[in-house]
Image (cartoon, coloured by chain):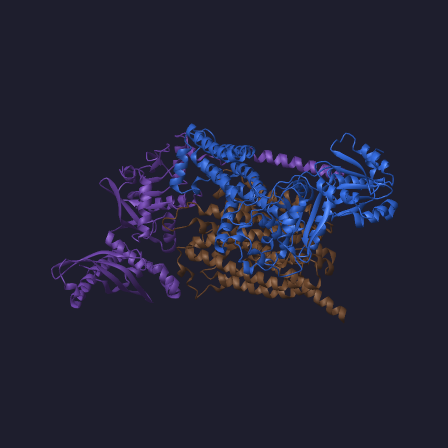
Amino acid sequence: MFTDIEVQMKNIKTIIIIIITSILLTGCWDSVEINKREYIFAVGIDKNDKALTFTSEIPKINEGSEEQRLVYTKDSENFSDFYATSYLHSEKAISDRLMQVIVLGEDVARDSETVKRIFDEIQRSPQMNRRVKICIAKGKAQDIINTEIPSNPIVGRFLSEMLIKLKRENYQDVYTFDEAILNLGKTGNTMIPVVEINEKSLKVERAGVFKEYELKGFLEPDEVAAVMVVLNPNKAKIRNVNIMVEGTNVSLGVVDIIMTTDMYLGGDKLTVDYYATLNSYIDSFIIGSNKLEDQSYLNKIKEEAIKSILAVSESTLYKLQHVYKTDLLKIKEGLFKYHKQDYEKISDKYDEVFEAADINIHLDMVIKSTGLVK
Amino acid sequence: MFEQKITPYQNLSILILVSFAFQSILMPLLLSEIDGPVGWMTIIIAAVVLYFALKPINKMMLKYKDNSVLSIINKIFPKFLSRLTGIYYIVMFLTANSILMKDFAEQIKLMMLFRTPLGTIIILILLTASYATKKGIKTIANIASIAVLIAFIPYLLIIIFSTYYADYSNVFPIYPFDVTGVVRSVPGSILGFFGFSILLFSNSKVTVQENNRLISRKFIIISSILYIACYLLIIVKFGIKESVHLVWPFISVMKYVNIPGFFFESTEIVGLCFQIIVTFSCICIIAYFTNMAMQETFNTRENGYFVFIQIPILYIMAVVLPGMYMMFPYIQWPIIVLSSLNLLIPLIATLVDAKSKKAKSN
Amino acid sequence: MSIYEDLANIKVDADLKKNETVLKEVFRDANDIVFRNMKVGQNKKLKILLFYVDGMTTKDSISEYAVQTLMESINLENLEKSNGIELENKVLQTNIAITELGVLQTLQECVDKALSGETILFIDTCSKAIWLSSRGWQLRGIQEPAAETLIRGARDGFIETMKINITLIRRRIRDPKLKVKYMQVGTRSKTDLALMYIEDIVNKTVLEEVEKRIKNIDIEAVLESSYIEELIEDDVYSPFPQVENTERPDAAASALLEGRVVIAVDNTPTVLMAPATFVSFMQSSEDYYERWMLACLIRMIRYIALPIVMLLPAIYVAVAQFHPNMLPTQLALYVAASRANVPFPPYFEALLMELVMELVREASLRITTPVGSTIGLVSGLVIGSASVEAGLITPIAVIIVALTALASFAIPSYNFSTSLRMIRFGFIMLSSFFGLFGISIGLCILIIHLCTLKSFGVPYLTPMTHFIERRSDLKDTIIRPKIKTLVRKPKYLQVEKEKGK
């Protein structure tokens, strides 16, 4: 049925297949079982005299008891050096594929060269978990990683879930490393969450102001909230506006913000006006009082509230413009997108223009509901 | 092998798939060459140029039914020139195929199989694609249709999903735009429509060739919409400043998923799995048309066995070539030359054919 | 030449004795063959010979409607005075009350008919024999098919008698254009086979191809329709079936109405339907009997079950060995923790559990029905939980394998789901070498194979391979179209008539 040539071709094909199969099946190069890896959940980076100190947290994988963890500290030049050394100190393969959070020590964050080196290495790594979160430690990152939290012993998981929650609730602008890098690439500035030790736990209230890969300073919680209002008005909330009106404590919450922005760049003079309408609710008043039915009283509340919010906003603006000289409000980006020609004229001296800019916030408040009291 | 025909819409699937593969490889060029997020203008210009170029080409191909552009050139040009053109197409297809394989293999290596040798990955893709190439155009057309349905569409959906938390104002500023940059990147965009080169061969394999003009138009429109959409997706996700640095934009888009609480840790691996099927279809399509080009250049009866010649050549080229990210600084002139030749060769053939027809009628 | 080979050349002799001698020689040592010599007519002068197979005939009908009428014939004298062709005609037209009969010329034909259950009547001085319809062996009653049960739908199923199966289909399509062509296959078994189609909607090319392939069958015996299936399909080496089979008359009728060809084989309660495509194996009669929305949901679930059957264990292996970062962090840690004390690598776990599952499946098939399913369940549970407790495998592997097994039962066609189960092992091997990349390569190879595969000229993956040209066919793939809109026959069968019911 088959000619000689066809039989020969068939034989050659079979031989080629056998050779290739045996070559290909000589080793499963990337096969490492899931339980034979050590997953770094959190890494803290501090500076020391010679190099960097890496503090890593690895959850122990024992059946039913993955709540235990291993924390160890090593001095290394960079991540690769750290992995290479750690590889030789454990029976398992070290893996950063499930890395949850990277904590930069304050001293590292203030050194732009070190930050650039670290960020470059993280960005290049093809294997590292792309959803790794980033935060700055107030003080030493090692202390943060070493914190024993009774409710959630794995610090990496604790911080990761905390940061996810803060981003979702619009407390913070940036929560992943990729977002931080994106902002730094776009505008050169970003706001990174700051983690601090809080008795037997950790807290993330403040944010660090980063400019050109260097930590310039910190923003307090209400300042962070003010910045978030400008950055993302649709999702922002102003919580707990506590004022005193005619001897009574009133607490308001702003739940809905409608904001428009007006930018004008005339030569070297930048003028930015933010017009915001704040829809608010009365959170707490005093039982038995009917004052909230009085429109003039409500107007007084509005006035006081606006004054209070404006005070915080203006102090935040002052800090950003004159103390940190960092445009966290993404005005630069807005100028680039909508006033490109004018922006290009001042792009190399933008910092001075920003410092001298006239940034105004105009607030209007609408009290949507005074609440129901029996 | 020689009698098989494909339907017009299968032809369309082939053209769109191949174009998409090269558009994604050449996207970084488009992103980086223009100062500003106005690359979509380049794409529109390229699409318009190709749209008008296709008119006379389709007319000529309809006249010479069942003949690819090389067969037509064999008929109307002297032997030496037609051989040269054939060799040009063979070399171009081989190079394009090996670049596609190399680029894709590197993505696989980096994202999925870090320690596996690159050669192993390349040979696996190559052998699988060759298995399909040997089966003929009908199988390849079927594969292209299936790939569009089960891989291409989910792949696009994943990319769209990944841009969920994007900033749509990143498409600004539009005016003033970088005119030099736009014009300079037109050859790259034209080359991105790689289906144009494939069309010159695949149109001869279609059952109802009268529909070819309509299909060509649809190809240009659909492909340019996809190209612009993908370009804009990248821009809205990253902004122009960051996009300039991207080597594999789609991978970056899929990697960068910043929806808080999203449980899936590695979207890019899922996307890559779909991309494997899309890329493998493109590789076997290009390999088949390389076979066809070889058959028509060397005047052989069959073309199936040329795939055995292609395998070692493609493997060596893919292994030896540096990655795309290393070639970007040097490929400006080759791109201009390639896209010009791709456009001019069939147009010149059309012109010569029209002139000879006039001479004959006189 | 032996007498068996010569039989086709031996004509029926006018002399009864000669016929009897030859036939007794042919059926030497066959004690179930009966030869009955009789003398009929008023004066008992007319000699006849009855020849039949004991157990295959209804003797009562022969006795009552043939022998008795011959014995008590009114035109006795005429009968006894006639001979040869005259006698033959008289007997055929006036003296036998059986409705179905015919004339035979050669002894081979007589043997074939007798072995099919008919009674052969030889009349002295006549050079032709008469066959009298007398088939009457013990039949199994019409029951619900065991492998294709429905919640809502007819409960009758095919049985081993071809003619009754044809009747079951005819009752559903009372159209004179429903044609039934009889054929015979098997040199020894001479199995009867019926080719059924509806004349104005069948694809003539497919019909001719099916006929041609059946005629080319050269085999000794056909014991089951699967023989025919293997002998006529396009690619025997493919794991995927290219001919569909069913035990349900409504499914067969539906196939006929689509323009397909149905092949009914004697001694088989399964009919074959050709051509068969990937999509047809994912369809079930139940889809058309349930409410539209529910049917759509069930169909979609079936298509979700398809990748689960093929790929779930392979994905587990790939994720556990190569890509742990694909899992959510909690799950990854849990899997790692559960694997801590397991000695076997994931691919071995997967293969072992799949093998055990197949063993359980095979074992439960051999055990009688009331006990079989219970034993299957118990063994699955015991083996699964015992293995986990012994630390041989992880709970995740048990869940994966159980899910895969369940998903395979969601596929309506048994032999199609078997093919998918087979392929699963290939995917597990590929994923153990190259992870998800290996699975994708496997999928590419599978797609190539399916794109090359044809069923009687129809591409196997139709209408997906022509999803623009045949987009009207796409509406009967993942979802079920409403009965009102189900008016067109599939375009891939290129039917001549556009609308039908």
Question: Who's the residue at 88% across and 46% down the image?
Answer: C81
Horizontal arrangement in the rendering, residue C268 relative to residue A199 (left or right): right
- Camera-side residue of C125 and B108: C125
Q: Which chain is purple?
A: A
- Camera-side residue of B54 and B241: B54
- Camera-side residue of A228 and C120: C120
State the image coordinates of residue B104 (x, y, percent, origin top left): 53, 47
* Residue A270, picture quadrant: bottom left
Q: Is residue B288 visible?
A: no
Vertical placement of residue B199 versus A49, above or below = below
State the image coordinates of residue B62 (x, y, percent, origin top left): 68, 63
Horizontal arrangement in the rendering, residue C6 relative to residue C471 (left or right): right
Work out which residue is located at the far bottom of the displayed protein and give it.
Answer: B362
- Camera-side residue of C458 and C213: C213
Q: Which chain is blue?
A: C
Q: Is residue C223 visible?
A: yes
Horizontal arrangement in the rendering, residue C304 relative to residue C336 (left or right): right
* Residue A96, picture quadrant: top left
Name the colour assigned to chain B in the rendering. Answer: brown
Number of marks: 0
The quadrant of the picture occupied by the N terminus of chain A is top right
State the image coordinates of residue B362 (x, y, percent, origin top left): 76, 72
State the image coordinates of residue A251 (x, y, percent, origin top left): 19, 57
